[in-house]
Image (cartoon, rainbow, N blue to C red):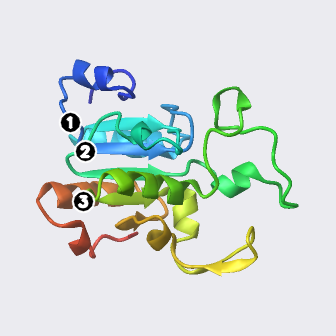
Amino acid sequence: MAKGFLPVTREEMEERGIDRPDFVYVIGDAYVDHPSFGHAIISRVLEAHGYSVGIISQPDWKDDGSINVFGKPKLAFLVSAGNMDSMVNHYYVSGKKRQEDAYTPGGKMGKRPDHAAVVYGNLIRRTYRDVPIIIGGIEASLRRMAHYDYWSDSFRRSILLDSQADLISYGMGEKSIVEIADALASGLAVKDITFVAGT
């Protein structure tokens, strides 16, 4: 496993001798390389199994180019809204907007969109039509099936459909992400990955 932080720029990736990463991980939180952050655990587990991961933290969802930091990954894009559901992150139960984002430097609001996993998934799909997108984290896990959405007071379909993702890794994903990575690396199409527990 390489020392130091995971690459967040193309230059950092090239310093590691990597032309194109196996995975690009798009996250709604600031990049913090600590096991209290799901993206750090998943990325380091993948790295320990020989896969390279580039991190795009809090991309500008209004700019399609913000997703092109590393170009097209070899295997897939990974997407997580962050350690907290983005709507809970943004609003009190009363619907009033929160003033601080605990997972952004300086507590600054506005660095991630509402329904971040959906927005990031669509941002990626507009640019990369044929790359697998795998979503995970608490937002995707809790919205993986048709559900009642408190914020809109309506029923919503699975986040898999709204995000245009190919696969959801729900719950604790340390084991399933390695199985998914191995399957993709073997040449298996993402649509055929139907045997991994937690997906």
Judging by the rendered image, the residue that carries numbered circle 1 is 20
Question: Which residue is denoted by mark 2 in the rendering?
Answer: 73
Looking at the figure, which quarter contains the C terminus?
bottom left
Q: 159 above or below 52? A: below
Mark 1 lies on a secondary structure that is: loop
Classify 10 Å Cα crowding around label 2: few (below 14), some (14-19), many (20 and above).
many
Label 1: how many residues lie within 10 Å, few (<14), some (14-19) or many (20+)? some
> Which residue is painted at 53% across and 38% down in the image?
58
Q: How many marks?
A: 3
Q: Earlier in the sequence, mark 3 or mark 1?
A: 1
At 41% across and 66% down in the image, what residue appears?
164
Residue 16 x/y as whole percent = 23, 22
From the viewer's perspective, tell me whether residue 22 is left or right of residue 172: left
Where residue 103 sits, quadrant-wise, is top right
Q: Is residue 185 left or right of residue 78?
A: left
Residue closer to the observer: 187 or 97: 97
Say which amino acid is labelled 2: Pro
Q: Residue at x 21, y 74 (%)?
A: 192
Left or right, 107 with reference to 7: right
Distance from Cα at disc 1 to Cα at disc 2:
6 Å
Image quadrant containing the N terminus: top left
- Find disc 3 in the rendering and name its residue: 130
Determine the image quadrant of residue 166: bottom left
Q: Amino acid at mark 3?
A: Asp
Residue 161, percent from left and from top = 45, 73
